[in-house]
Structure formats: structure tokens, C-alpha cells
Image: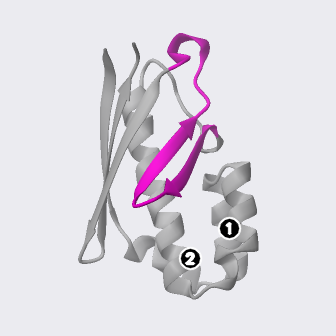
Amino acid sequence: MIVGIGVDILCVSRIEAIVRRGSRFTSRFARRILSDREISYFGSTVSTQEEAKQAKYLATRWCLKEAVYKAAYPRQILRWSDVTITKIGPKPTMDVRWSPGLEGAQAHVSLSHDGGMLAGAVVVEKS
């Protein structure tokens, strides 16, 4: 059974503007939207890369987390830290800390990008 469908569109330049402001702003933003696992990876790997890669990493997570929030609402109101996005192969995957009512649900994820825009779609399914 499909619980919900969520879609988000993001102009990557919004996140690039935060990254351009400097590492203090980037770190604060990252701590706000990333899960503990994502923060660890960002701090050890992504934060030392060029600004464009930092912005892409953060923008991807923002977009997909917004989409899963919309898909789960109103059954569960997710927090940023409830969702961890990883990339296994060519496609992102999502690990979500579901509430008891959605335990065992799966989030199917799709992400597209073109011309500085990201579009994320998530379908939440529970058998």
C-alpha cells in the first residue's frame, strides 16, 4: 500500500550561497539538516572538497528529505535527523527512522538534476 508521495524542487544556487559564505555557515547548515552518519561523512570527506561538491551534497539531501517529509505527512512528522541519504551505485537510498505506525515502511527515491535545479521524488510504501 502506498502511504504517500512527495516531490520537492530545489534551485541549487540557494545552497551554493550558503556554502560561499564560508565554513562556519556551511557547518551550521550541515548540522541542522544532516543525520549523525551524514555529518560524520560530510566532516571527514565532503567538507574538504570544492564548494560545488559541498553544495551538491547538501542540496541533494535537502531536496530528498523535503520530499520524504511530504510523503510521510501527516502519518509521521519527520525531523531532518530521522532521515539518512546514502548513495549505493548510481541511485540514492534512504534510511528512515519510522514511528511505530510506519515501522517497516520503505522509501523509494528518485532524483533528477538539470540546469541548476534538483527534483526529488519519494514514494513511501508499507505492506
Question: Which corner quadrant of the image does residue 41 belong to?
Answer: bottom right
Residue positioned most to the left = 115
Mark on residue 95? none
Does 99 appear in magenta? Answer: yes
State the quadrant of the C terminus: top left
Residue positioned most to the front = 89
Q: What stretch is highlighted in magenta?
A: 82-104
User: Circle 1 is placed at which residue position?
Assistant: 42
Q: Is mark 2 on a helix, strand or loop?
A: helix
Residue 102, compared with residue 35, is above or below; it is above
- Residue at 55% from the left image edge and 53% from the top image edge: 86
Residue 39 percent coordinates (x, y):
71, 59
State the quadrant of the N terminus: top left
| Earlier-in-chain disc, 2 versus 1 | 1
Q: Which amino acid does label 2 sit on?
A: Gln
Mark on residue 54? 2
Using the numbered discs, state the Cα–Cα distance from disc 2 to disc 1 in whole angstroms. Answer: 8 Å
